[in-house]
Amino acid sequence: MPDAGNPEKKQIPVRENLFTIPKSPEEKPRLIGSKCNHCGEVVFPRMTICPNCGDANVEEKLIGPRGKLYSFTVIYQPAPIGYKGPVPYGVVKVEMPEGLRVTGYATINDPTKFHIGMEMELIIDKIFTDGHDVTGFKFKPA
């Protein structure tokens, strides 16, 4: 996806097969996880062996796009080596309807704007620029 301001600049995912990229405005992004056909465990990111029971009979499971805020924090210190995004930044844990909790960046970094149980929506957004826009998933208040 070229950037409108710079046709040469591409958007690349921070990691392949982590999330779906909507093909239309009506389509919502989803996280790509897996579900064990033996014990029913749902995990993210996708795995080839169930971490709960060790069975290899797993299938891809799309997760999201909405959940409820379980926990949050705002980071004011620069992150570990390799982080290239803005500071401060919000980090949230979102309880998804599929039965798991996913940790990710938030689109807001003001602790007064969060409240436990609020609806959160998954989005795909720029995390940092490194020659190209590197995209990842974030959660925003729904």
Image (cartoon, grey):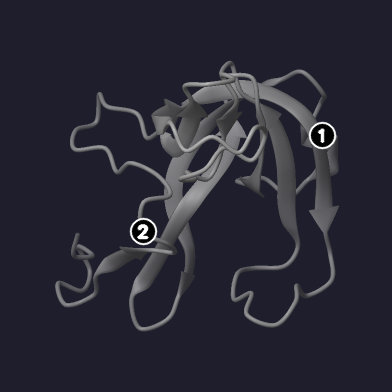
Identify the residue at horizontal 25%, vertical 24% (top origin).
Answer: 26
Q: Which residue is mark 2?
A: 16
| SS for dot 1 | strand
Q: Is the residue marked by circle 2 packed among few (<14), some (14-19), or many (20+) residues within 10 Å?
A: few
Quadrant the C terminus occupies: top right
Residue at 65%, 32% (x, y): give it: 53
Mark in the foreground, 2 or 1? 2
Q: Is residue 34 left or right of residue 98?
A: left
Disc 2 marks which amino acid? Glu
| Residue at image mark 1 | 71
- Location of the N terminus by quadrant is bottom left
Callout count: 2
Furthest residue in direction left, as rendered:
7
Three-letter amino acid code at the position of disc 1: Ser
User: 102 and 1: which one is in front?
Assistant: 102
Residue 39, position as x, y percentages in the image: 59, 20
Element under label 2?
A: loop
Q: Is residue 131 left or right of residue 9?
A: right
Q: Residue at x 73, y 37 (%)?
A: 93
Q: Position of residue 131 (x, y in %)?
A: 35, 83
